[in-house]
Image: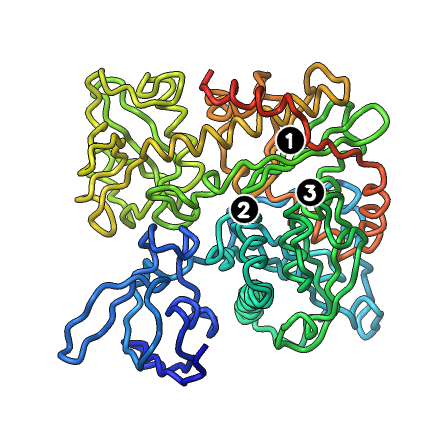
Amino acid sequence: MSNKKINIHILPHDRLIQTRSGISLMEALMGKSIFLRSDCGGKGSCKKCKIKKILNNGSHEIKNACTLMVSEDISIEIPESSLMSSHIMSKASLSFPEIFKKRFENPIKLKPGNKSKIEEGENDYGIATDVGTTTIAIYLCNIIKGKVLSSIAIKNPQALYGDDVMSRIGAIGLENKNLGSLQGLVVKAIEWGVKKLLRSNSLNKSVISQMTAVGNPTMIHILAGVDPKPIGMSPYQPAFYDARIFQSNDLGFKMDNFPIQILPQISGFIGGDILSATIAVDLENQPEGTLLVDLGTNGELMLKGKDKLYATSCATGPAFEGATLSCGMQAIKGAVNKVEINLENGHPEYTLIDQSVSSKPELLKSQPLKSKPSGICGTGVISAVAQFCKTRVLKPNGAFNSKDNIPALQKNDLGAMQYIIVPGDCTDDGQDIFISQKDIRSVQLGKAALITGIEFLLKRAGIKKACKIIIAGAFGSFLDKKDMKTIGMIPPMEENKVEIAGNSAGAGAIMILCDKLFLEKSIHLADKIEVIDLAANQDFQTAFIKKLNFP
């Protein structure tokens, strides 16, 4: 590989960065903490990392940053729509059990002039981070007060190497240097988020004293710089199981050095994230038959049995979080998050995640949209598919019902059917926002994996029916319970027995950061969990195929 230095001139801000030749523009930008969208994993198919390459005559060409190789000095402009999104998670809920709240609810009141260790430690700040396959959630906390000051969510830039853990393990298997590249991406993303949170709270970067990081085993191995390849091959075991402490500078963080606490790993696919969520929902003290479902790119399940916990994982896929979908995006400003089909005229109506105003014409006259739709997020797709099931836009097997006269169902240039949610003349980039047949198939695969995993877990524990289901995960926080039941993601049950818990993995990480009692609890719990390996179960695939159909 060439070591020739290349200049990249970024307009209109007149920023100059240097990189080496022989890598993609996306990689070069990521190396300087400029993260672009890469929903397709850097294959050039999603076309969401578009940049303007400025030519010598002042005109420009539209290029995909992931496929544009850097070989000479270049001037570019980056459209805002191509930048990897980040946002303060003011709407992402965090729920803590009473045992945690009580430990911090009665701070010591002091007389004027007196000081205590509590006062002296008020600048003792830490970071809790939930390193998801698709999204990284970062929380700035006051450890002494047990308080979250602010938080941020960013897309995991490792998507450049694939949307799921097996793709990233495969990339490391192809070239060992990719482990360092993947580690560097996640470290830079976390550090970028931490610095942004510190700036928003007028804090110096030197105040961070420690970090707690949770995630699935592959994400934690990569963060720690430990080869995850054993997870990708039978018997699918992590390189380490125990809780560990790493030093931030050893992992590549450029900030002042601080310890990073990692939780125990349960198996190759069940890690500190579901363990952290288990603590946050106080599953040990829930009724027997309570099921915790942590929804994300990988669905992780934990069941309270008679005398122990049962756990399994299922590959729900990145579609639930908006990745890989034709018009998918993160759950941020401009994302369609709910769809409803008007039964009178058959046309879809929608809401955007950043505003409650719908697309109904009569409402738009008095309350115009603050921003135009840019795409559809995971909750929007689930909402749309549930509507398709109710209004027979879809057949039970998931195929579009092309025989009926459905106004929004159209053929694209290649003759494939797609359902238009928002026509191009109403969108941010002038392109239709639609759901394709392939998108429907992705939802089918995800929901079939989840419901089959739930049924097998219950059977193994000798429980006929879950008494309660707790839905965790940032994605699950915004799901409609009725939509989940409509498409068959969860078993039929009373709506009041389905609870939405928010980002429980993040909440557990915060608890462990602020009080080591909960770290000890996680280590204790890890020894009481029986893992159910669905991949090794011959009946799972048969049951999974049967669940592909919608109810």
Kind of residue indicated by mark 2: Ala
Which label number is shown at residue 92? 2
Residue at point 34%, 37% (across, down): 351
To which quarter of the image does residue 66 belong?
bottom left
Question: Where residue 482 appears, x then y in whole percent?
Answer: 49, 23
To which quarter of the image does residue 74 belong?
bottom left
Q: Toward the viewer: 114 or 128? A: 128
Kind of residue indicated by mark 3: Ser
Q: Is residue 527 above or below residue 395?
A: below
Relative horizontal placement of residue 174, taking residue 505 as reference (left or right): left
Nearer to us: label 1 or label 2: 1
Q: Which of disc 2 and disc 1 is earlier in sequence?
A: 2
Specify the quadrant that holds the N terminus.
bottom left
Q: Which residue is mark 3?
A: 234
Question: Where residue 284 appears, x then y in whole percent?
Answer: 80, 34
Question: Where residue 201 appears, x then y in whole percent?
Answer: 57, 68
> How far, Cα to Cα, is label 3 from label 2?
37 Å
> How far, Cα to Cα, is label 3 from label 1?
31 Å
Secondary element at tag 2:
loop
Kind of residue indicated by mark 1: Ile
Q: Which of disc 1 and disc 3 is earlier in sequence?
A: 3
Residue at point 59%, 24% (across, down): 452
> How far, Cα to Cα, is label 1 from label 2?
16 Å
Nearer to us: label 3 or label 1: 3
Which label number is shown at residue 507? none
Secondary element at tag 3:
loop
Q: Which residue is mark 1?
A: 470
Relative horizontal placement of residue 345, taking residue 201 as reference (left or right): left
